[in-house]
Image (cartoon, rainbow, N blue to C red):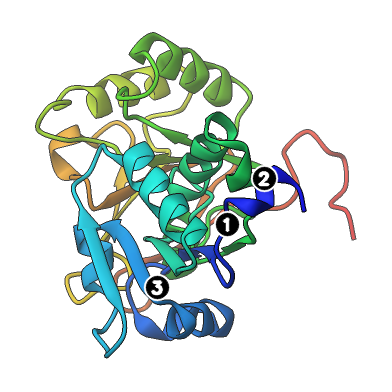
Amino acid sequence: MSTSRMALQPGGCLTIIGLGPGDARYLTPAARAALDAATDLIGYFPYVERVPERPGLKRHASDNRVELDRSRHALELAAAGARVAVVSGGDPGVFAMAAAVFEAMDTGPDHWRALPVAVEPGITAMLAAAARAGAPLGGDFCAISLSDNLKPWALVAKRLDAALGADFAIALYNPVSKARPHQLDDAFAIARTHRAPDTPVLLARAVGRAEESLRIVPLGDVRGAMADMSTLVLIGASTTRMIPKADGGAYLYTPRFHKGLETQPA
């Protein structure tokens, strides 16, 4: 047996689980089965609280901004024989814990690489928000986090400018916080150099939870104060359209074809 495997206790494994947007109906059966099989649950406090308590499940909740410490703890428990579930909201591979776990593994002891590790996907915020609004991601799109905790704001702004210039619909994660009250307004200012004032901006807050709200605001009128960290902000492409609804609301969609084509593809 290799030295990497000799350090492992039998039965240990690690599953990184996406809890989806909040409504338990949107948790996948595979994710639910992984939670049911776990002996140890690890994650940020609000996500751990979303998993019901049960006998035999040890809960290890921690604060935000300790993702690598949390990941190392999970790998250590799994190496010691625990069946560990690391939970994230939405999808764990989108601005969440999956990358942190693999980063910890990449820089950690060799025997961690012999652990069985799986990722169970979830419905991420931009998909949940888009589904509520209609189909604003029907054409090409991208996702950008406005947080500068792990990368400089200058890089965020550069990526925003490039994506807006390429006419993507853009989903903005982590749009605003007490430490970053100005960056969403800065992002809107960049958007206004590329998009018309009537471009629809979707503000989708707490999708899948009791306090859910959706609002569509023209780019010329939208302000950063309209969002918080529970809000997914989606800036439409130049082709994104609104269809008025009978109740006064609207459907939002981005056609699959782009202006400039002579005919619409089949």
Distance of label 3 from label 2 (alpha carbons): 60 Å
The quarter holding residue 178 reads top left
**Mark 2 = which residue?**
4
Where residue 16 sits in the image (x, y, percent)? Answer: 50, 60
224 lies above or below 94: above
Q: Mark 3 or mark 1, which is nearer to you?
A: 1
As drawn, the residue found furthest toward the left would be 178
Distance of label 1 from label 2 (alpha carbons): 8 Å
Give amino acid for label 3.
Answer: Lys
Q: Quadrant of the C terminus?
A: bottom right
Give amino acid for label 2.
Answer: Ser
**Mark 3 = which residue?**
245
**Mark 1 = which residue?**
8
From the viewer's side, name the closer residue of 142 and 41: 41
The first of marks 3 and 1 along the sequence is 1
Which residue does the image show at 51% across and 19% down from the upper left? Answer: 159
Which residue does the image show at 84% across and 52% down from the upper left? Answer: 264
Which residue does the image show at 44% across and 77% down from the upper left? Answer: 38
Which residue does the image show at 57% across and 72% down from the upper left? Answer: 11
Cβ atoms at labels 1 and 2 below 8 Å apart: yes
34 lies above or below 170: below
